[in-house]
């Protein structure tokens, strides 16, 4: 137990020094000192409650998911029946009362239509039910309705996708360690520490970035369009801006367009003639082929570029666009065009998100929390050091050195791992420091007991570390299990507390048991004391 070969001593010191030196960038930052640019900087990031920043709660409307699913099913049904070996004509297609309805012109093909439509439905997770119901009424009318299980599954998938899209957009802003988690069935909590412009974040997250290219219906009556009356198969879409605050409207084909989910890139650019800000987009191979087909088949016709339900422009297709790229122009500023490019690169949100709650935390409050946390940690550490020195003498010195080293190791590991320090994390840090000497107390008291039983010095020390180690490891394993559960099922502040607690438990066991045992064994071999001052 007390035998430490040279390789083991070197390994223990190497681990301790690497972890401790990794804390220097964090300590330098807290002290207001500049860290050399050429050196690595594994710095602990501060959370929202310490660095200040923005807290935003976003909410989605589940009914929008139902509407989207019905529209997608309508287009899928049309394409499926059109691609059948013997195409089937349908009519009177509509989406009423949350379901898709259509008539089959030839009643003898009802079974064939059912067999063609059935593969468009799927199982709703592990519920044992399908995501759509298919019914035939009045002999030749199909009614396709999304089930509640299918809607719930679609909402879950949409929210999971929305979380990833939000994360990509925030990462594009260059922020560090944002917290983006789901809250309930249809809400997302976004916390961005150190954000200086919360309004830009709101604008970025509030933009769905649903980009569409649709053909303009030139046969639609301007009078009907102005009154919001759409011809069959069309939809009315307003322009983004209009004179006198009144935006004109146009009729576009509801189906058959191209969506922006097939983009591979979007970059801020400039119009070489007017120097106005524009956005250059690039399609993937499938999207480029569809875009080329759309423009080739409709040369001389206008098509609308629609973003989030508003027309940015409706240029005329002068020639086929075969390069797989296009330029979006509008009344953009450099900032708005840049935000649009970020949104398009990150992907469109599957559902609209609206801000239902917003809080801004100032950096002064976080600085005060850090100052008070440092005071609490300093006072607690000093009180522990005095107690341990008075009680255990030389062994107390080893415990105090291990305690200080443990503090640096915690910060170093947090910096290397890239964790975020929050106010509950500071509480966990202080708690870990306070509990770090528990292992030393158990060991030293056990050594006292062994000496009282008459064991020699080396035997007493060896038995003290051996027997106390079982209790130390058992206690800390249960603490790690509890902290792991807090991390797995908790959120925000609870996670921050759990992370610091897990790291602190590991480093405290290493310093309080492994390192102090090494120091004690080296002292015993060197001094060979006849008794212990315990």
Image: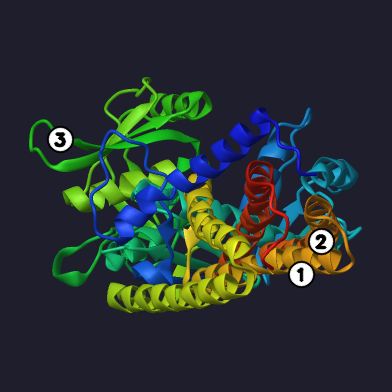
User: Nearer the viewer's eye, disc 2 or disc 1?
Assistant: 1
Q: Is residue 348 visible?
A: no
CA distance for labels 2 and 1? 9 Å
Residue 491: percent from the left, percent from the top? 61, 69
Looking at the image, is 485 positioned above or below residue 22? Answer: below
To which residue does mark 2 refer?
Answer: 468
**Quadrant occupied by the N terminus:** top right
Residue nearer the viewer, 486 or 367: 367
Q: Which residue is mark 3?
A: 271
Q: Is residue 534 left or right of residue 113?
A: left
Measuring from the top left, give residue 511's x and y in whole percent. 62, 53
Give the residue at x 30% y 23%.
319
Q: Tag 3: Cα neighbours inside 10 Å, few (<14), some, or many (≥20)?
A: few
Camera-near label (3 vs 2) is: 2
**Distance (Cα) linking label 1 and label 3:** 79 Å
Farthest-out residue, front: 530
Left or right placement of residue 111 versus residue 304 in this view: right
Quick one: label 1, few (<14), some, or many (20+) residues within 10 Å? some
Q: Which mark is residue 445?
A: 1
Q: Residue furthest left?
A: 274
């Amino acid at each position: 137990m007390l035998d430490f070969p040279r390789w083991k001593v070197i390994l223990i010191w190497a681990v301790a020094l690497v972890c401790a030196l990794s804390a220097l960038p964090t300590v330098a930052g807290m002290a207001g000192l500049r860290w050399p640019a050429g050196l690595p900087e594994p710095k602990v990031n501060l959370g929202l409650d310490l660095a200040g920043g923005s807290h935003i709660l976003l909410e989605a409307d589940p009914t929008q998911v139902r509407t989207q699913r019905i529209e997608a099913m309508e287009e899928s049904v049309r394409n499926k029946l059109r691609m059948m070996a013997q195409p089937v004509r349908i009519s009177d297609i509509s989406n009423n009362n949350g379901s898709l309805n259509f008539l089959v012109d030839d009643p003898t093909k009802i079974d064939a239509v059912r067999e063609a439509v059935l593969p468009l439905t799927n199982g709703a997770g592990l519920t044992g039910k399908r995501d759509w119901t298919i019914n035939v009424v009045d002999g030749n009318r199909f009614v396709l309705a999304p089930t509640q299980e299918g809607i719930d599954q679609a909402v879950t998938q949409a929210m999971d996708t929305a979380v990833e899209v939000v994360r990509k957009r925030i990462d594009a802003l260059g922020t560090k360690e944002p917290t983006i988690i789901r809250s309930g069935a249809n809400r997302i909590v976004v916390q961005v520490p150190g954000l200086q412009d919360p309004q830009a974040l709101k604008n970025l997250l509030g933009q769905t970035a649903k980009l569409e290219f649709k053909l303009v219906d030139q046969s639609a009556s301007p009078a009907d369009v102005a009154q919001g009356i759409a011809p069959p198969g069309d939809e009315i879409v307003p322009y983004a801006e209009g004179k006198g605050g009144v935006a004109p409207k146009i009729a576009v084909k509801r189906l058959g367009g191209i969506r922006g989910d097939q983009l591979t890139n979007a970059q801020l650019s400039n119009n070489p003639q007017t120097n106005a800000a524009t956005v250059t987009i690039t399609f993937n191979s499938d999207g480029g082929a569809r875009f080329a087909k759309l423009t080739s088949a409709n040369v001389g016709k206008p098509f609308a570029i629609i973003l989030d339900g508003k027309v940015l422009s409706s240029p005329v297709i002068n020639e086929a666009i075969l390069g797989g790229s296009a330029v979006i122009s509008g009344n953009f500023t450099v900032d708005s065009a840049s935000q649009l490019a970020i949104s398009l690169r990150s992907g469109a949100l599957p559902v609209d998100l609206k801000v239902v709650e917003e809080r801004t935390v100032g950096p002064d409050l976080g600085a005060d929390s850090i100052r008070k946390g440092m005071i609490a940690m300093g006072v607690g550490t000093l009180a522990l050091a005095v107690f341990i020195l008075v009680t255990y003498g030389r062994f107390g010195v080893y415990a105090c050195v291990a305690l200080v080293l443990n503090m640096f190791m915690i910060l170093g590991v947090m910096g290397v791992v890239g964790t975020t320090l929050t106010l509950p994390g500071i509480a966990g840090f202080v708690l870990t420091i306070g509990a770090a000497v528990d292992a030393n107390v158990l060991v030293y008291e056990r050594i006292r007991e062994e000496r009282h039983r008459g064991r020699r010095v080396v035997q007493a020390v060896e038995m003290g570390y051996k027997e106390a180690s079982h209790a130390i490891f058992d206690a800390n394993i249960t603490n790690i299990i509890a902290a792991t559960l807090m991390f797995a099922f908790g959120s925000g502040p609870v996670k921050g507390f759990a992370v610091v607690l897990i790291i602190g438990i590991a480093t405290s066991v290493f310093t309080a048991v492994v390192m102090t045992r090494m120091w004690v064994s080296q002292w015993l071999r060197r001094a060979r004391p006849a008794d212990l001052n315990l």
